[in-house]
Image: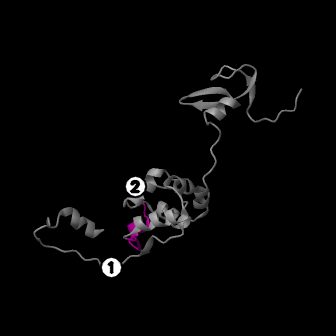
Amino acid sequence: MSARRDTGDKMGDCELCGATKVSTREHRVNKAMLAICQRCVGQMNLAPKQEAPGLAQARRTPLSKPKSRGFNRNNVMNKQEKELVDNFAKLILSARESKGWTQAQLGQRMAETVNIIKSAESGKPPSDSVVKKFEMILGIELMVEASSDHQSMIGQSSNSRGMTIGDYLKDLR
C-alpha cells in the first residue's frame, strides 16, 4: 500500500486521450466533468489559474467591497467629489509605454481584460475600481477634486446643434 497524498487524483483511464492505468483528475471540459490525465491537463491548459498580481493588490485595497447591482452610492464619480482628468487616456497610454508594457501585460498586472485597457486608452471612461487599479499599477493620478467652474454655452452658431435634453440632463449630473 503506497502513501499517496489525497490530491483528488485517481488511477484510471483518461477520457480525453484514452491512456489507461494513469493518474486522473476530474476537470470540467465545456459542460462535462471528465477524468483527465496530467499530460492532457498540461496540453489543454486546464491547470488551476494563478492569480494576477494586480488582482492581489486590488484585494488589499479598501475598494475591494462587494459590487452591488444598479446605482452604486460609493462610486466617487457619482458623488461628484472627484472627477476623472480630461486627458486620462493619454496619461494611461504614456505611463504604460514608459514602463515598456503591452496592453496585454498591463491587463494581466491589473487582472483586467485587454479590451478594458484598449477602451480606456481610446477615451472611454473606466469604472472607479479600474481607475484605482490604473493609478496603483502605473503610479499615476487620474482622479482629481471636482471643479465647480463648469460652463455650458447655450445658443446657436453656424456649426452648433443647440442644446438638447441630453445636454441638459448631463449638466444636472
Quadrant in the picture for residue 87: bottom left
Query: Is residue 149 a member of the stretch shown in magenta?
Result: no
Q: Amino acid at mark 1?
A: Ser
Q: Is residue 99 left or right of residue 18?
A: left
Of 94 and 66, the residue lying toward us: 94
Colouring chosen for the image of the structure: one colour
Query: Is residue 84 a member of the stretch shown in magenta?
Result: yes
Which label was assigned to residue 70?
Answer: 2
Classify mark 1: residues with Cα within 10 Å, few (<14), some (14-19) or many (20+). Answer: few
Residue 36: x and y in percent read 66, 27
Q: Amino acid at mark 2?
A: Gly
Between disc 2 and disc 1, the foreground one is: 1
Q: Is residue 18 left or right of residue 168?
A: right
Mark 1: which secondary structure? loop
How far is mark 2 from mark 1, CA to CA? 26 Å
Residue farthest to the bottom?
149
Of 148 and 22, the residue lying toward us: 22
Residue 75: x and y in percent read 44, 64
Q: Are marks 2 and 1 in contact (CB under 8 Å)?
A: no
Quarter of the image for the C terminus: give it: bottom left
Residue drawn at (42%, 55%) of the image: 118
Q: Is residue 74 visible?
A: no
Residue drawn at (44%, 71%) of the image: 143
Residue farthest to the right?
1
Classify mark 2: residues with Cα within 10 Å, few (<14), some (14-19) or many (20+). Answer: few
Residue drawn at (22%, 65%) of the image: 167
Name the residue tied to disc 1. Answer: 148
Range of residues picked out in magenta: 71-85
Mark 2: which secondary structure? loop
